[in-house]
Image (spheres, helix red, strand yellow):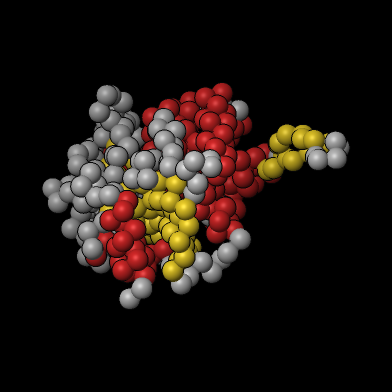
Amino acid sequence: MKLYEIFNIDKPLYEYLKEKEPLKVNYHSDADGVSSCALIASIFNIERSKYFPISPSHFGMYKEGDLALDLGSPLVKSWNGCIIDHHEHPDNPSYPLVLGQVPTGLTIYHALKDHIPDDRKWLVVVSCVGDGQPEAIPSELWDMYPELWHMSGNVYKNRYGGLKAYPYPLYAKSSSPVNSLCRTGAVSKALDVLLRARNIRDVINNVSAQLAQKEVSVEENRVLTDQNNPVQVESIGNFTIVTYKSKFNIAGRIGANLSKGDRNNTYIIINEITKEASVRGVMTIYLTNKLNEVGYLAGGHSGYGGITLLQTQTTTELINDLRRILTK
């Protein structure tokens, strides 16, 4: 089984990208996208300016630059840079593409392993965990970083007054700080945290990231207990539409928690304020493809997907279109 395929690049990938330094990089605003950018920065000189690296506001909406990471196929026809990704692309892409079967950060690892410094390969762990595929972490990284299984956590009182420790392995905690910063809108800060970190502990213990984690946790609790704006649910067959209101993009967290208890259901979680939505479940690819056919920006991969509404699109229209798609 091929772990990745390369299209429209007629020389070794390292040489191809090296010739374009400093690389102008676009990256996705999640742990896989951010760690992918940090991995590329460990190999190549990337432009650090007010323009790049940049995380586009819409998935697939990258217009300029040399490299797009974990962002799906380009929505702008004029794009002529390179893409490293693991989402769906045309069968015969017209652009340079490295298409992986695993998270984008892990695809970079497989394609450029010999050029990544050993002290930066832990970034692949953040990528895999952030993409919900910790089982894809390469065996050699477990040997290289035995601290990944070191346990860390907190002690809490239970309802009877007793104490209970809740430690988790470091690898499992590696992506939450990055995702939390992204969910609060601090995507550039998330990248900066990874670029500066020397190891996974530095990421987990970063003060800004810890504050973001608390913000996200408090906001999620507020959303789920708000009596004035309760979370709404509508079920159609094996699909459930969930709507909520928040300044943060916490749809992925809500969807992940809901899908844990119901593996056969597919959840569409819609933020009515930010106009972002997350899809979780078996029918994710089926649904995002159907939405693309009727004019929405939707994409993802097995079990995980996202929807971004354009300025002219409303959440009410999205819900109505979902009803039509799901009742056919």
Q: Report the side of 21 relative to 149 (left or right).
A: left
Q: Quadrant of residue 122?
A: top right
| Relative image position of residue 88 (x, y in whole percent) | 32, 61
Q: Residue at x 31, y 53 (%)?
A: 316
Q: Does residue 109 appear anywhere in the picture?
A: no
| Residue 305 drawn above or below residue 245 | below
Q: Where does residue 117 sit, x and y in percent of width and height?
A: 48, 36
In the rendered image, the quadrant that contains the N terminus is: bottom left
Identify the image quadrant of residue 136.
bottom right
On the picture, is 304 further left or further right than 174?
A: left
Which residue is most to the bottom?
Answer: 328
Residue occupying image coordinates x 45% and y 61%: 234
259 vs 25, left or right, is right
Nearest the viewer among 281 and 39 is: 281
Q: Please state the total of marks drawn on the protein image.
A: 0
Percent x, y for residue 237? Answer: 46, 72
Q: Is residue 206 above or below residue 131?
A: above
Quadrant into which the C terminus falls: bottom left
The residue sitting at the front extreme is 228
Percent of width and height locating residue 261: 61, 61
Residue shown at the point (38%, 30%) measured from the top left: 188
Residue 135 is at least partly visible in this image: yes
Residue 20 placement, left or right of 178: left
Q: 135 or 8: nearer the eye?
A: 135
**Residue closest to the eye, 168 or 199:** 168
Residue found at x 85% / y 40%: 160
Q: Nearer the viewer, residue 144 or 59?
A: 59
